[in-house]
Image (cartoon, rainbow, N blue to C red):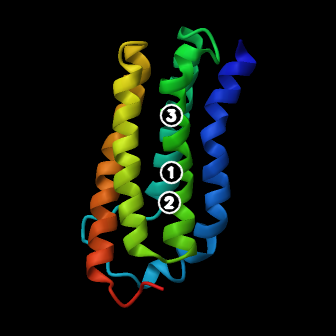
Amino acid sequence: MWTHILGFTALPHVGGILGSLYTRTEVSTWYKTLKKPAWCPPNRVFPIAWTTLYTSMGYGSYLIWKDVGGFTSTAAVPLGLYGAQLALNWAWTPIFFGAHNLKLALVEIVILSGTVAATMVSWYPINKTATLLMVPYLMWLTLASSLSYCIWRDNPDKEE
């Protein structure tokens, strides 16, 4: 049981760790030059937030997996949507920080937010606690989407 909990909880962090390969250099160079709104969180908040969010969503996915009896046909929609949103989540960092494609990053994060909402809707009848573990993530994505929009709007010359 503990190996499943650890595996599901650790999985989302894989993309975060890989994404840090982009952010490590770009935050102090390219990102620093972007015009950002006054309400933009300080850079030190992002790794703390993502560690918490990845852990919560990972544990939530474990609860769903456990409650549907593993990788069964019942798991296809809730875990399929979860996998899709996780892939979209992992794709945002290379699009924004790697390709510097602000418009595509904005479109992508809006699609990601919708996929997270759909994931939550599919999880709710299975496990309400798992669904509630996704609420901070969706709230953070709302902030991140607004931030992406403002950065795209205010930096037309920074897109490559």
Disc 1 crowd rating (10 Å Cα; few below 14, some 14-19, many 20+) is some
Task: Say what secondary structure mark 2 lies in.
Answer: helix
Type of amino acid under label 2? Trp
Q: In the rendered structure, which disc, 3 or 2, sits on the residue that comes first in sequence?
A: 3
**Furthest-right residue in this view:** 3
Secondary element at tag 3: helix
The reply to whether discs 2 and 1 touch (Cβ–Cβ < 8 Å) is: yes
Report the front residue among 153 and 46.
Answer: 153
| Residue identified by numbered label 2 | 92
Q: Amino acid at mark 1?
A: Leu
Q: Report, in whole angstroms, how far the alpha carbon at label 3 lies from the one at label 1.
A: 10 Å
Q: Residue at x 54, y 78 (%)?
A: 28
**x, y percentage for residue 3?**
75, 20
Residue sitting at x 28%, y 67%: 149
Tell me if label 3 and label 1 are in contact, CB under 8 Å.
no
Q: Residue furthest bottom?
A: 157
Residue at 32% across, 86% down: 156
The residue beneath circle 3 is 82
Tell me what residue is drawn at x 34 percent, y 26 percent: 121
Q: In front: 69, or 141? A: 69
Viewer-nearest residue: 156 or 17: 156
Sequence order check, earlier mark of 3 and 1: 3
Q: Which residue is mark 1?
A: 88
Q: What distance separates the C-alpha of mark 3 from that of mark 2? A: 16 Å
Above or below, 41 relative to 125: below
